[in-house]
Image: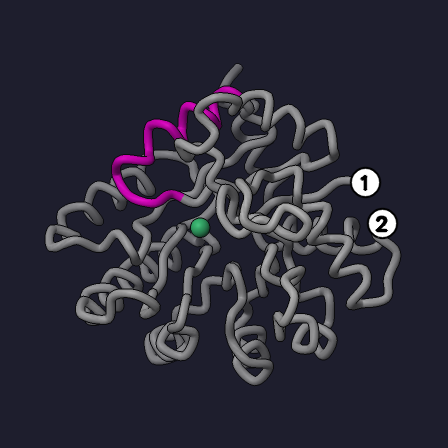
Amino acid sequence: MNFTDTHTHLYADQFSDDRSFMVQRAISKGITSMLLPNIDLSSVDDMLALCKEFPQYILPMMGLHPCNIGADWQNTIQIIEQHLRHNSYIAVGEIGIDLHWDKSNFNDQKAAFIYQMMLAKELQLPVSIHSRSATLECIHSIEQNKLFTGGVFHCWGGTLEQAKQVIDMGFAIGIGGVVTFKNSGLPEILKQIDINHFVLETDAPYLAPVPYRGKRNESAYIIEIAHKLAEIKMLPLKAVSDITSANAERIFNIKAFTQKQKLNSI
Ligand SMILES: [Zn+2]
């Protein structure tokens, strides 16, 4: 059984003591593709170094995270843009709007999101969208500017109606550890959506699923998320593995990307 972790920050400091072992552990459990969303300029080198160590398994995205939109974001985004134009990335991410903590720079967050969505559209890349407490704002930005790039709304936190809107616009729903939390309303929403619109993600090192809740998350734990989705959809685990892997392949073209990287490295 194979799984794809479509959103995982394996370059984070939390893994500095055992990073290679942790990745090997995930690979040995069948997590054969791990997609790394970028955060800002400080995460780029570590991210690319890890992708180089495991080129057929770990694949980089490029983008500026909405929580890292500083006063100089326009300069930062130009460098991000150069990376995207001159190197191979599996997607643009993670990008979006976050109104959970800081609402004061909403306009900058929105402008940076739209700019990066436009880049994704031009470069024909899918996106990984962070929409914490801002699902509606992300939907509006995409709709108003017709930025139907495809990709994933990661760590879904919207309503059933919003999920349907997002799917109608050609995006998939990213399901992570939150689905395993007690009192999570997510299972009820997921019951009413076709599994063909779901991809799995850990968002490691954050949001570890039960029974690891509160601890450091890692890509191997995606199996706990898959088990929960199997229970919600009343399907065997193998079906969840097959369908969500096929969904991820359809969105991100993972095989073509790794094939191209293999040729480039010869
Ligand atoms: Zn993330």
State the image coordinates of residue 59 (x, y, percent, origin top left). 51, 36
Give the answer, above or below, for where 32 lies relative to 103: above
Side (left or right) of 254 relative to 79: right
Q: Is residue 41 magenta?
A: yes
Q: Which residue is mark 1?
A: 1
- Circle 1 sits in a helix, a strand or a loop, which is it? loop
74 and 174: which one is in front? Answer: 174
Q: Residue at x 40, y 51 (%)?
A: 93
In the image, residue 119 above or below residue 263: below
Q: Is residue 216 magenta?
A: no
Side of 206 where 245 appears, left or right: right
Residue at 43%, 60% (x, y): give it: 129
Residue 210, disc = none
Left or right: residue 127 compared with residue 39 = right
Q: Check disc 2 and report the residue beneath it.
A: 238
Q: Residue at x 21, y 41 (%)?
A: 79
Structural crowding at the residue carrying mark 2, measured as other residues with C-alpha within 10 Å and reported as few (<14), some (14–19) or many (≥20): some
Q: Which residues are magenta?
A: 38-53
Tell me the distance, in whole angstroms, between the alpha carbons under discs 1 and 2: 6 Å
40 sits left or right of 186 in the view: left
Residue 42, x across and y down, in percent: 27, 35
Horizontal and vertical percent position of residue 260: 54, 31
Residue projecting furthest to the bottom? 161
For label 2, the SS is helix
Expressed as whole percent of the image width and height from the top left, the position of residue 247 reads 67, 56
Q: Quadrant of the N terminus?
A: top right
Q: Are marks 1 and 2 in contact (CB under 8 Å)?
A: yes
Q: Main secondary structure of the magenta part?
A: helix
Q: Quadrant of residue 192?
A: bottom right
